[in-house]
Image (tube, rainbow, N blue to C red):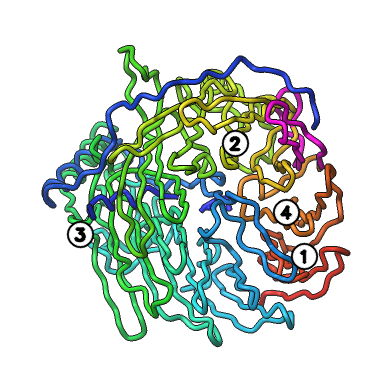
Amino acid sequence: MTSRRPTLVAGTLLALLLLAGSVAATRSPAPKTSPAGPESPLQLVSFDSCADALTELRAATAAEVHPWGIANGAPQQRSALELLDASGAAESRPAGEHSLTNGYEPGVDEPDLVKTDGQRIVTISQGVLRVVDPTTNRFTGRLDLNDGPDQHHWAQHDLLLYGDHAVVLTDAAQMVLPAFGPSRELPPDSPQPGLDIAESSPRPATRVRLVDLSGPPRLLSTYDINGRTLDARQTGSTVRVVVQSHPQVTFPELPATADDATREEANRAAVAAAGIEAWLPAYEWTAGAEHGSGRVDCDRLSRPQIGTGSAVLTVLSFDLTASRLTDGDPVSVAAAADTVYSTGDSLYLAGQRQLAASPTPGRWPNPVGASVTDIYQFDTTAAGRPRYVAAGSVPGRLINQYALSQWQGHLRVATTTTSQLTATTGQDAATTNREATTITSQDERSSESGVHVLRRQGEVLTRTGAVTGLGPGERIYSVRYLGDTAYVVTFRRTDPLYALDLSDHAAPRVTGELKITGYSAYLHPVADGRLLGIGQEADLDGRTQGVQVSLFDVRDPTQPLRLDRWHRPDAWSAAEHDPHAFRYDPSTGLLAVPVNAGLRLLRVSGDALTDQGEVTHPAGGHITRSLLVGDTLWTVSDAGLRATDPMTGQSLAWLPNS
């Protein structure tokens, strides 16, 4: 969501089916407008029984077994861009008020390292929650949520805030939960030869902590569940947390002399002998003296009609007005997803699925490595568990949640398609791009991108229109939708910024493009038809040359222009892959972005970007976030918080973490 969440996102809710530089623009080959045409409709179905679920889960897992475990058994680290999410509309912050987390859609909050309601600032750093009074510039509370002295070295923590309650989400990717089923019989230091993780690694767990902030911070309730956190979203007082878990099968330890065939046969036998508890996540909760535990029931588990997956995605729903977390009302689906997009009234879960190569001609010929993105829509207008309403598929893969946008009853989806997915010699768009990025692999040469428009018809998300052929040989690095307009950046050696007209849902079209060196990994709207982009400058061969902030004029959709830019050679910014690190204040034009370890202050005024200096923290303080409370800029690092006058850059206070 960090390279985290960037989150922070999560195909879990599927199971809910059970509830019913200015450069003259040059032209690339003309993009193609493609008619829609649904293939086999994607749906969710429930299992007939626990025995039926076990049979299918065993079969799906056995298909992924290899001599050293399960091919997809290791929790995969989310790319920074996948977790990224953030910013569907420019934040509006009248002077004297406070800034919010830079999120994608208004009214939908996303977990982050710091939150403020204007009266207090709440941070989570290395497992310690701290509360700051921005009026007196002092700490007023501290709560250590670590279970041990070394936990903060590996766990990822994030916050959500509602009234006097805070929720702390911990993606404890190496934590062992006690007494969670048969697979927990092994001690934490026992080898796990069947999993694609370090042989002595404990299994992952998600932790949720409810904290009361009405006085000194105190822990009200806890919740632990097997699996790693994919992402979370908050609408009003309702928080939904998506968790991904992999089969907890204990594979046999064989002598080093055993050959691969013997190992694979033994591993398949272990899968065939595993009970349903190896797949259904176990959880436990506490609230004061109360305690409960359980496991997701078979009647809470569903699967896509196209087939059962080996992993299980679970969505948990919590009410932040309550004084305890209880069981999270879990529902699960035996499928994979990696992107969460929420508008408040709808929640979409999307995941990439590989297609088997097919020589048969058709609307979607399936070359080697071709993939589709499966999308599931849920109604979230009511609090509590979402209600499944529809599903659909589009060709290609998403870069992150910014590739999705709901508008006027339609869902727009930007994807990159490739004819094969071979190893790439350059860095992926989801990385921090700190090193040279020369893309030379065959899959990039055979790629192109497009925007597909879907509309719900019954329980099917049907494609109504598409424009394809964007960036031949390139892939998408960023997307931004603004009403009936979209901006798409593709990159391999140069950066075409495409402007798209999506006003006709049946016939979206490209209206203009701008080719410049480098790329923008994140796009953010500003007033008067301008667009900010942050990414990397690059030479003509695509080798990155340092962080770059661009100011674009997109008032004329046929001729987008770059008005100004700021460039720092050999530098990088966390905002390239994590929009939560990006801060823009429309009331003053202040732009604050982390650059290396400091925070660079720029000013957007008219058609120009002005450098106004840098905020730094003491040695070891790597600034990750900034926020505005009144007229004061606060910056956050693991070392502490600094209050700064954003107009002069003068430090007003330094609060060291201790």
Assess disc 4: are there few (<14), some (14-19) or many (≥20) residues with their C-alpha within 10 Å of its C-alpha.
Answer: many
From the image, tell me which residue sits under label 4: 594
From the image, tell me which residue sits under label 3: 297
The tag on residue 485 is: 2
Q: Residue 141 versus residue 483: which sits nearer the camera?
A: 483
What residue is shown at x 55% (from left), y 56% (from top)?
A: 106
Q: CA distance from mark 3 to mark 2?
A: 44 Å
Bounds of the magenta span?
Answer: 538-566
Type of the residue with mark 3: Asp
Disc 4 element: strand
Of discs 1 and 3, which sits in the foreground?
3
From the image, tell me which residue sits under label 1: 617
Looking at the image, residue 398 sits to the left or right of residue 19; the answer is right
Of discs 2 and 1, which sits in the foreground?
2
Type of the residue with mark 1: His
Type of the residue with mark 4: Pro
